[in-house]
Amino acid sequence: MSTKRGIGYLLMIVGVALLIVQNFGSKINISLPESISKTAVLIISAIAIIIGFWLTLKGKPNSIEEVPIYSGEKIIGYRRH
């Protein structure tokens, strides 16, 4: 896994975790500091999820093209290019 994809997954997990804590924090006895408004948490978590998703798409490996190996006119194998 590439570093970009790993960071992207981590950001998405943090974003989803913030949303869970904001919405269900009282039920699981976890709370955020009082100085942070619910709107700010919503915006931060949405940005984290969007950036994480973008990084996971950006970090995908490029497709590897296979080039034929010829012996005369016959293809005897393929190599990755």
Image (cartoon, grey):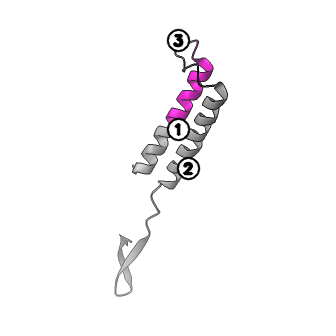
Q: For the residue labelled by badge 3, is the local secondary structure a helix, a strand or a loop?
A: loop
List the residue tagged with mark 2.
54
In magenta segment, residue 16: yes
- Which circle's residue, 3 or 1, is located before the other in the chain? 1
List the residue tagged with mark 3.
29
List the residue tagged with mark 1.
12
Q: CA distance from mark 3 to mark 1?
A: 22 Å
Q: CA distance from mark 2 to mark 1?
A: 10 Å
- Amino acid type, residue under disc 2 in the picture: Trp
Q: CA distance from mark 2 to mark 3?
A: 32 Å
- Which circle's residue, 2 or 1, is located before the other in the chain? 1
Residues at circles 2 and 3 in contact by the CB criterion of under 8 Å: no
Q: For the residue labelled by badge 1, is the local secondary structure a helix, a strand or a loop?
A: helix
- Amino acid type, residue under disc 3 in the picture: Asn
Closer to viewer: mark 2 or mark 3: 3
Q: Position of residue 80 (x, y in %)?
A: 37, 69
Residue 24 sits in quarter: top right
Residues shaded magenta: 13-26
